[in-house]
Image (cartoon, rainbow, N blue to C red):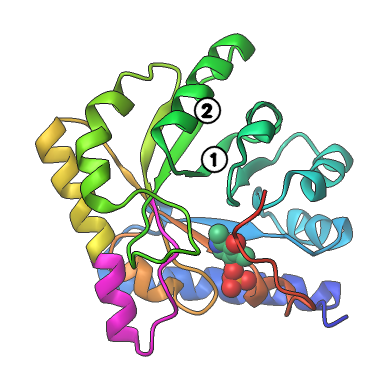
Amino acid sequence: MSTAPMDDTVRNLTSIRQRINEACRVAGRDPSGVRLVAVTKTFPVEAIRAAFDAGQRVFGESRLQEAMPKIDALSNDISWHFIGRVQRNKLRKILAAFDVVHGMDSLGLAQAADRMASELGLSPQIFLQVNLGGEETKGGFAPDELMDLMPALRELARLDIRGLMAIPPPAESEEQARRMFAALRTLRDRLQAAHSIDLPDLSMGMSDDFEAAIHEGATHVRVGSAIFGNRTFSTPPARA
Ligand SMILES: *Cc1c(COP(=O)(O)O)cnc(C)c1O
C-alpha cells in the first residue's frame, strides 16, 4: 500500500488548501467560491478521519458499496458527494446516502432521480456530467444534446441542478487542460443564456489539474491522490 501515513494526509491537505488559495489569488477569485471535495475512494476510514480532524468536511466517493460502510462509520457532520458513474439500480440508495451527485448523465436517469427524490422527501444537489472529449468510455451528455434536453431537465422540480461536471481526457499541457475547462464554462454560459436558468457551479479539476480548473471557474475541485497518496489499484470513474 502506498497510502500516505496520517500525518502526511494532514500535511498534504494543508498544502492543497494553500495551492487552492494561491490559484484563487492569481485568478482574482474569492477562495470561498471553491469547494475542495476530498476524494477518498480506495482509502480507509482512518484516512478520512485524519482529514476530518484537520477540518475537511466535504468528501467524494465513486462506488456505493465501498462508500456505505465509511459513511456509516463517520460523523454526520460530513457532506458526501457521489462522483462515480450512477447506475440506475443503485440510484435510490445513492440519493439516500449522498448530498450531492456529480455524475447525472442522462435524461432518463435524471427523471428517475426526480421521482425517487420526491418519494424520499429529498432535494438533492445535482451536477450534469458532460462528455467534453466525446470519449466512448466515459459517461456524460454530449454538449449539443444537453442544449436540447435542458427544457426537460429543468422541469424536474425535486432536483437542485447546480451546474456541470466533467472529467476531461488527460491533457498534455496546462494550456490544453485550460481549454477543456474553459469549454465546460462556455457551455454553462450558453445554457444559462439560452434557457434562462441559473447554473452556478462547475465541478472540474483533479489532483493533476485543479489549479487550471480554478483559473477557468471551477467551484468544486475533486482531489484524491494529492491528499491521500497513490491508489494501489485504479478505479475508473465508470462504475458505481
Ligand atoms: C478518482 C476521481 C477523482 C480524483 O482523482 P485524483 O487524480 O486522485 O485526484 C476525481 N474525480 C473523479 C470522478 C474520480 O473518479
Q: In front: 2, or 214?
A: 2
Q: Is residue 180 above or below residue 187?
A: below
Q: Is mark 2 within 8 Å of ligand 1?
A: no
Q: Is residue 71 above or below residue 174?
A: above
Q: Is residue 55 above or below residue 197?
A: below
Q: Is residue 13 above or below residue 113?
A: below
Instruction: Pinpoint residue 9: horizontal percent, then vertical percent.
Output: 75, 72
Q: In front: 32, or 36?
A: 36
The furthest residue to the front:
136
* Magenta stretch contains residue 178: yes
Quarter-of-image position of residue 135: bottom left
Which label was assigned to residue 144? none
Instruction: Pinpoint residue 4: horizontal percent, then vertical percent.
Output: 80, 78
Amino acid type indicated by mark 1: Val
- Would you name the residue on which mark 2 appears? 124
Q: In front: 191, or 47?
A: 191
- Looking at the image, residue 238 sits to the left or right of residue 74; the answer is left
Placement of the N terminus among the 4 image quadrants: bottom right
Q: Secondary structure at mark 1?
A: strand
- Would you name the residue on which mark 1 appears? 101
Q: Are marks 1 and 2 in contact (CB under 8 Å)?
A: yes
Q: Residue at x 89, y 42 (%)?
A: 73
Quarter-of-image position of residue 212: bottom left
Amino acid type indicated by mark 2: Pro
Write down which quadrant ligand 1 falls in.
bottom right
Q: CA distance from mark 1 to mark 2?
A: 7 Å
Which residues are the magenta region?
A: 165-182
Q: Residue at x 82, y 77 (%)?
A: 3
- Looking at the image, residue 179 sits to the left or right of residue 13; the answer is left
